[in-house]
């Protein structure tokens, strides 16, 4: 029986090994970083529209949208993709049979890929700078970094929900492409919340992306941001809630697959 000190260290070791393993997998599988190659290019279209309409002052909105869409796509896309790959390669049975809940190494692997999504902002910033000559200033870098870190965590944790639901279907790619758009629309990433129908606006506050977009935009304004702690807390709480619900759903879904004898079927 392991000592109490080793018992406390083991979960962190498992997370570290899972994260390191996913980095190695991502080096060989371009699908894991595919959003980094595609979504930031949407910033090119958004910035072109803003520049030609005389609203280059709103470039920060395009960069924030690109960042959140890349982070969101990396989490929602790669979360279900990891499970689908484990299932296709007959790894899922071994992972589920281990004493450690599958959700723990899974969220560590998703977290690694979601953190890579932050590169989407760098790519978009370079596009704005080099292509359009727009220099977007981050006036509050600490707020930007903290909000970005909280967003990465919330995205990885929330991805457990979509991963759990998608593990029962054989058409994962279809649902991956369908889930992102509505979330970006409802959270105000694509269009401002006031442009949404009045009946949908209250739903925005239950999506972590709404609070992330609000804070990231404030970090690029010269004025002093207000109510920072409550908004950061909203991202953290929604992330923790999403992770708890996702872990519960994933356990239920995997139990259903084990009961049906289809755990390793692709």
Image (cartoon, grey):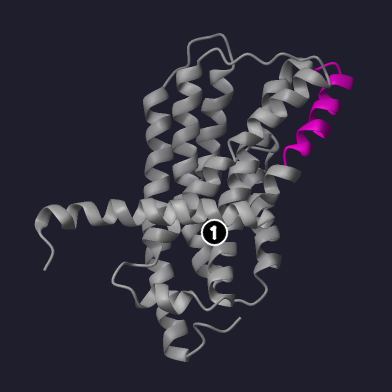
The spot of residue 184 in percent (x, y) is 64, 45
User: Which residue does the image show at 39% across and 67% down from the upper left?
Assistant: 102
Residue 83 in sight from this viewpoint: yes
The spot of residue 167 in percent (x, y) is 54, 72
Q: Which residue is the extreme one toward the right?
A: 52
User: Which residue does the image show at 44% across and 60% down from the upper left?
Assistant: 106
Instruction: Give the left or right position of residue 68, taking residue 230 as reference.
Output: right
User: Which residue does the image show at 52% across and 50% down from the upper left?
Assistant: 23
The spot of residue 9 in percent (x, y) is 22, 52
Assess disc 1: are there few (<14), some (14-19) or many (≥20) residues with their C-alpha within 10 Å of its C-alpha.
many
Kindly indicate the quadrant of the structure image that contains residue 28. Answer: bottom right
In the rendered structure, does residue 40 fall within the stretch colored magenta?
Answer: yes
User: Which residue does the image show at 51% across and 45% down from the upper left?
Assistant: 207
In the rendered structure, does residue 59 fall within the stretch colored magenta?
Answer: no
Kindly indicate the quadrant of the structure image that contains residue 244. Answer: bottom left
Instruction: Give the left or right position of residue 231, taking residue 193 as reference.
Output: left
Magenta stretch: dominant secondary structure:
helix
Front one among 47 and 21: 21
Find the magenta span and give its range: 39-55
Residue 198 in sight from this viewpoint: no
Kindly indicate the quadrant of the structure image that contains residue 119. Answer: top right
Front one among 119 and 168: 119
Front one among 64 and 197: 64
Q: Which residue is mark 1?
A: 79
Check disc 1 and report its element: helix, strand or loop.
helix
The spot of residue 16 in percent (x, y) is 37, 50
Number of marks: 1
Q: Is residue 156 above or below residue 67?
A: below
């Amino acid at each position: 029986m392991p000592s109490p000190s080793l018992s406390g260290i083991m979960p962190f070791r498992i997370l570290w090994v899972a994260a390191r393993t996913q980095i190695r997998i991502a080096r060989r599988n371009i699908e894991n970083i595919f959003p980094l190659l595609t979504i930031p290019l949407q910033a090119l279209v958004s910035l072109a529209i803003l520049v030609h309409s005389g609203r280059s002052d709103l470039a920060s909105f395009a960069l924030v949208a690109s960042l959140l869409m890349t982070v969101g796509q990396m989490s929602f896309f790669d979360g279900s993709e990891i499970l689908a790959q484990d299932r296709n390669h007959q790894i899922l049975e071994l992972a589920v049979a281990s004493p450690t809940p599958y959700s723990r190494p899974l969220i560590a692997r998703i977290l690694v890929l979601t953190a890579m999504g932050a590169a989407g902002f760098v790519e978009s910033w370079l596009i704005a700078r080099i292509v359009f000559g727009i220099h977007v200033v981050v006036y509050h870098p600490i707020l930007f970094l903290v909000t970005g870190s909280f967003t990465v965590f919330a995205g990885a944790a929330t991805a457990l929900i979509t991963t759990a639901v998608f593990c029962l279907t054989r058409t994962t790619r279809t649902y991956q492409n369908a889930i992102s758009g509505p979330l970006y629309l409802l959270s105000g990433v694509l269009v401002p919340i006031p442009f949404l129908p009045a009946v949908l606006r209250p739903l925005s506050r239950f999506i972590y992306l709404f609070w992330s977009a609000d804070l990231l935009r404030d970090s690029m304004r010269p004025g002093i941001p207000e109510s920072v702690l409550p908004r950061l807390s909203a991202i953290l709480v929604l992330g923790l809630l999403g992770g708890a619900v996702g872990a519960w759903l994933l356990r239920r879904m995997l139990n259903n697959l084990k009961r049906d004898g289809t755990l390793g079927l692709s």
